[in-house]
Amino acid sequence: MYRKYFRAMPAVLGLTMALTLAVPAQAAEAPSSQEGKIVILHTNDVHCGIEEGLTYAGVSACAREMEAQYGAENVTLVDAGDAVQGGPIGALTRGEYLVDIMNQVGYDIFVPGNHEFDYQMPRMLELMEMLDAQVLSSNFMDLTTGESVFAPYTILTYGDTEVAYVGICTPESFTKSTPAYFQDEDGNYLYSFCEDESGQALYDNVQASVDAALAEGADYVVAVGHLGVDPSSAPWRSTDVIANTHGIDVVIDGHSHTAVDGQEVLNENGESVLLNQTGTKLAAIGQVVIDPDTDTITAGLITEYEGRDAGTQAFVDGINQEFSGVLDQVVATSDVALTTLDPVTGERIVRSQETNLGDLCADAYRVVLDADVGLMNGGGIRTDIPAGDITYGDIISVCPFNNQAASIRITGQQLLDALEMGARYAPYESGSFLHVSGLTYTIDTSIPSSVVADVQDNFIRVDGAYRVKDVVVGGEPLDLEKTYVVASHDYMLLNAGNGMTFDGAEVVKDRVLPESEVLIQYIRDELNGVVGQAYADPYGQGRITILTDAQSAGEPETPVEPETPAEPETPTESETPEEPQEPAAGTETYTVQAGDCLWNIASQKLGSGFRWSEIYDLNRELLSDPNRIQIGQVLVLPAA
């Protein structure tokens, strides 16, 4: 069936105007022409942000207004995961009140994200039973039965049109939740996400569900995935799944917290598939409109909406009131703003470079647990702390995972391997990026990562040069044979979180305090209740040095880009750029600069990062690998 696709325009104030994003400017229609259209509203990665962005009351109001215009039977509300974890109310109720709110809003379909598993498997399954929405996942498999835990897909009927929804969970759930939650007491995996090194097992699984839905009579297929577009998520990204399957019309995505507004991505047959993702914490509401009469599909983001559903707002207000006495309790103060963000660009950097809040968290573990070294993963630091009073709610918002503090005794070699595992995607984002206390280290990004991991992304070994170097512990160079006491939380040290295993480690202190109490105790007892000027620099105290290609080659310093959703690898300095090609008529050239990748070149010069493949196609004689571009290479660009 031939489909016409249109990329939606940004929405503006009010739903009446926001609805125009479902129809391109050249095909604008009067409201009377909405009859028969199918509207899919969607959210992802809310992470307990119930009153952030457009708010859950806004989502509810938007859905009700859509139902009034299109007919309630033609509107479906979908969430693509990571809803029940990430804030105080989620942590204190182990997800239950977030499920209650989602039921109040009226979600129809839900696909679990990796953080739905953070309260452990029995609780996750219990929460999914509480949820009124139908839970879908094609690839979350019970290995004891060989069956999917949830329905792989469902088909909803809208008049004479049938739309299939296929659920896809990220295989990164193993390491971006807690690996032990998916294992038995002997460490054997009880569950699978159809993971393998090439991604083919996932693609085959999704294709089988798509084929089954089409054979059952579906006219359209909407994949709802918690997959993302981050380079560290390859080969399981939404773009990877699209490129290796056929039959999907639209992908509603999550996981990478990226705003993607109706981008066209080619499938394995060269056909366009629309990709939509709303970012995080209700920054937008996603909208997909299917018009069976014209066989057209449009997608985009509603970024501004003023409506609020009174019933949902009252429901949320009641929950907030219930917890206000606990969460509003002042536990400390800070003279400085503690951040996860770059104060200049506003971009998140806590997963790619040092910040003062990362230093504070790592210090808390080292000091409170009396260890040689404190470690804190960037993905475990979820929000900022502004200057002024620090409440209990602020502390839980920073570390909402209910992790427990622990310490282990490991060799210097194991410590080096852990740092290398955390640095493998630098200077790009990774939740495994390690903030440190009691040591300093350097990451040389000109050295490609040679970390070898298994199909669940668990560390096996380093098979080549280390990009982590100049490690100093307590003022002395790291001794690979010596043992050190390392403190952090049980997620990383005891449960192989972020994929780092510490085989044979001696447990010194086993789950002695909740992570929130570690931070409170450190500020209260060691800092006399006040975070002072020692933590004033938002970029931290200089514990982590990140060298770019230019710096490794002795060239002037170039700032590290904090977040670029593109290929993680960078070239080695030994490679020499080849001679530039002659541009064809209607094209231009671009000289590669430090920190560039094909994604950001496409974003800057062509208006969309998704056009990186066009640049690669034009330069295949020069580029043997799209992940490796070199400073000084002259690339031919397609017409903008």
Image (spheres, rainbow, N blue to C red):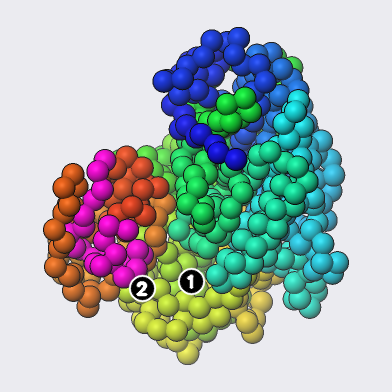
- In the picture of the structure, the residue carrying the numbered disc 1 is 421
- The residue stretch that appears in magenta: 617-640
CA neighbours of label 1 inside 10 A, class few (<14), some (14 to 19), many (20+): many
Q: Main secondary structure of the magenta part?
A: loop
What amino acid is labelled 2 in the image? Pro
Label 1: state its secondary structure: helix
Work out whether residue 533 or residue 284 is closer to the camera in this orientation and state it: 284
Residue 398 in the image: x percent, y percent? 56, 46
Work out whether residue 330 or residue 395 is closer to the camera in this orientation and state it: 395
Q: Nearer the viewer, mark 1 or mark 2?
A: 2
* Residue 94 in view, yes or no: no
Residue 251 in the image: x percent, y percent? 58, 44
Work out whether residue 471 or residue 128 is closer to the camera in this orientation and state it: 128
474 left or right of 95?
left
Q: Which residue is depicted at the point 72% across and 31% down?
A: 161
Q: Which residue is depicted at the point 32% across and 74% down?
A: 447
Q: Quadrant of residue 305?
A: top right
Whether residues under marks 1 and 2 lie with C-beta atoms below 8 angstroms apart, the answer is no
Q: Is residue 352 above or below residue 63?
A: below
What amino acid is labelled 1 in the image? Met
